[in-house]
Structures are given as C-alpha cells and as structure tokens.
Image: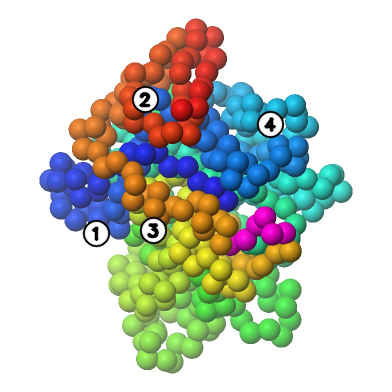
Amino acid sequence: MEMYVPSRYVSQEDVEAADGCAGKYTVGLGQLNMAFCDDREDVASIFLTATHNLLEKYGLDPHEIGRVEVGTETLTDKSKSVKTSLMRLFGDNTDLEGVSNVNACYGGTAAVFNSIAWVESSEWDGRYALVVCGDIAVYEAGPARPTGGCGALAILTGPDAVLAIEPGVRSSHALDVYDFYKPHHSEYAAVDGKLSQWAYLSSVDQCYLRYKAKYAAKHPGAAKVGIDHFDYFAFHTPYNKLVQKGFSRLLYIDARDSSADSSTPELQPIVPFLATPLEESYESRDIETASRTISQSRFNAKVMPSCRINQNVGNCYTGSVYSSLLSLVCDKGAALVDKRVMLFSYGSGSVASIFSLVGRTTSNAKFSLEKIQSSTDMFSKLESRKRCSVADFTAALDLRAAKYGKAPMNPDGDVDAIAPGTYYLTAINDKHHRSYTRK
C-alpha cells in the first residue's frame, strides 16, 4: 500500500473558532485536522503521485502489473476513465485491464473485489493487479464543509499477500436512497445528513448479520461470530463519531442474536432495548447511548488504531476504509500477523460490504507489514504538513469552485505549496485536455 495526502491542512479547532462553535467538529464529529488542495491538484494528479510512489518504493517494473482498476467519485470527465490518466507511468505496457468504478465512496472496494476476482480467474496471467482509489472531498460553505478531506491510495493485489482476504464470507447490502449524490455541475454534493446516517448504520447491521450467517454456513458447528471474532476493525469514515456509532451497532446486534451473553453485567445497559424492532432502533438516543457505553472499551482497543489517519486527513471517500486499514498497519506493523481485521465499506446511494482479512508473513522478501509501515511512514508524514489558516483553506476551495469545468484554464494555486515528488496540474486547454508535471 501507498498513500498520498496534500502537504497542507486546516485545524478543526481553527474552523470551530471561525464558525463560533467550539467543540462541534472536534468533539461532535471527532475530527482533528482536514487536508485540502487548491486548483493545482485534481484526482488524476493525486493518483499519479500515489501510483508513482508505490512503483518506486517497491522497485516494481510496470510490466509486472496486468490490471489497473480505479475507484473514485471525483471525476474529471463523464466518459474518459481516470485510469487512463495513469498510463504514462506504465511505459510500453499497455496490456492493462480495468477502468473506473463509480458509486460514491464504494468505488475503491468495487475495484478491490474486481481485482481479486481477476487474480482468481482463468484470465489471470500471473501479474499483479493495482487498485488506485481516493478523492478530493469538498463541500459548499455550511455544516457539511468540515467533513471534507483529500487523499489517494495505491494498493497492490495478488497471491501470497501480507493482508489476506478471507474467502466466502463477505456480505453486501444495496439500497436505492438519495442520501448523498451529485446532480449538479459542481464538485459539491447534495446531502441529507439524517438519511445518510440511517443508511450507513442500517448497512452496518445488514452486512454484519449476513457475514455471521455466511460464516455459520461455511463453518458448521463453529461458535457464532461475535465482535470478539475480530481483533481489529477498519471502517469507512465520513467522520470519527459515525464510526463510533457504527461499531456500537455490532455489539447491539450480538446481544440481540445471543452472540454475546446479555446476562453479563457488561451488557445490562442494552438489555431493555433488545426487543425493540430493529428499524425503530436507529431513532433511539437511549439505544445509541447504551450501545456506545457497552462498546467503548472495545472501540478504544480495536478501532482507534485505525482512526489516526482519517482523523487528521478527513474523508477521502473511496479511499477512506483503506486509509483506516493503513492507519492500523502503521500503528501495529508485524503485530498484525495472525490477527483478523473486519472492514466495513460504504458508498452512498447506497452500496455497502463487510469483509475480513488476516495479517501474515510471506515468502516474498519484497513485501511485509513492516515494509508498508516504514515505506508509507504516514504518522511522520502527517506531522510534517503545513498548518494553514481558515482563510487559506477557504480561499483554496473558492479557487477550486471558480475554476471548476472551465476550459481553457491555467491554475492559479501556489506551486510552492506542492511537495517535491508530487504531480500537479499545469494547464487545461480549450479542448479540456489536461497536462501534468511532477515537482
């Protein structure tokens, strides 16, 4: 894995001060900082940076890659796949399957599942598949703006992997719901916050129930899957407080289906609500409070190690669940060997999945959990970024909005704000052709 985040961020405390709402974003949302970029960067440039860095750090020959699949909702064109913008990195290797996957924040997981299916198929030619996912999440001024962010991940998939996905148990849940969508000629989404929270939490429940059922069918006679079946968790993270709510639903579901012993003192706060119809439980503050109370210690131990990147970067949409996973790897390193991680991926509209993986050692000396940990060096990378003012942050987003869809267009963003080794946009001509260079 490799991850790119912009070199600038704004503190959520500073945004709170500017908005006159102390604690709303740091305590209410659970966020700390938010990455941002101006018109010098777009989804193709951040993907180029992440992909170039992965190939370089692992000494991969472009001909070792046989599939490049992208997940994003930050589109630069309604027809031309963002994947094609990466082809300059692969030289004369044009035998590369894969295109872009689009469904809000779920596209990265669709790309991962497609890539794994290719490796398992009769069409696999022995080469690696590369998934590139991420987004530039921006909102118009208002209550949703602090839930933005920016980041891109490149993920190499193939056999003998150090993070091995468990087969036969992944589960999904799809709905037709308008909780977050982009009907306008703008980077800004239409958002129904209350509906989106319901869709996210109900998807956690349904995916988890189906995972339990599939595991039971695959392993007859085994103990029921409960929250302690997993050592760690990595969630799609619009904001950290929603992750807390989502995780607390798991123990509530366990208590409802007797995967957890509701007679124990630990679970007594939730016992009065076990007979509540599931659909009514999403509106209950009492159930939310009780669920979070009984799950808090597990959340701190099993989930918080995966939260550090997203709390400091914000929501990178299709990359969010994988930056959670990367945060966990950067925190635990080789200690993840033989540990099971549950991932919950969600994309508005909506599609969601739960799947699991296990950390392991590999016979290929090029790959290891420690290599991911050291080569990304994410926690140091986060600390080395530049803290910018709210005025700088607002100006960057205003610049993006003013330039959106314009052609010809010459970016006005500050090249000095671009870190060495980063790709950035140099121009868009009158035919909407985009040009990039690497600093």
Which is more foreground, mark 4 or mark 1? 4
Q: Is mark 3 on a helix, strand or loop?
A: helix
Q: What residue type is labelled 4?
A: Phe
Q: How crowded is mark 2: few (under 14 residues within 10 Å), some or many (20 or more)?
A: some
Stretch in magenta: 364-369
Return the x and y of residue 149 as percentages of the image width and height: 38, 42
- What's the CA distance linking mark 3 and mark 1? 15 Å
Q: What residue type is labelled 1?
A: Val
- What's the CA distance linking mark 4 and mark 3? 33 Å
- Judged left or right of residue 365, residue 280 is left
- Is the Cβ of the residue at disc 3 closer than 8 Å to that at disc 1? no
Q: Is residue 221 above or below residue 86?
A: below
Task: Say how many tags the image has.
Answer: 4
Q: How crowded is mark 3: few (under 14 residues within 10 Å), some or many (20 or more)?
A: many
Residue on which disc 3 sits: 308
* Residue at image point 55% right, 41% down: 53
Mark 2 vs 1, N-terminal side: 1
Residue on which disc 1 sits: 27
Residue on which disc 4 sits: 90
Give the residue at the far top of this rendering: 430
In the depicted view, which residue is nearer to us: 121 or 350?
A: 121
Q: In which quarter of the image is residue 183?
A: top left
Which is more foreground, mark 3 or mark 2? 2
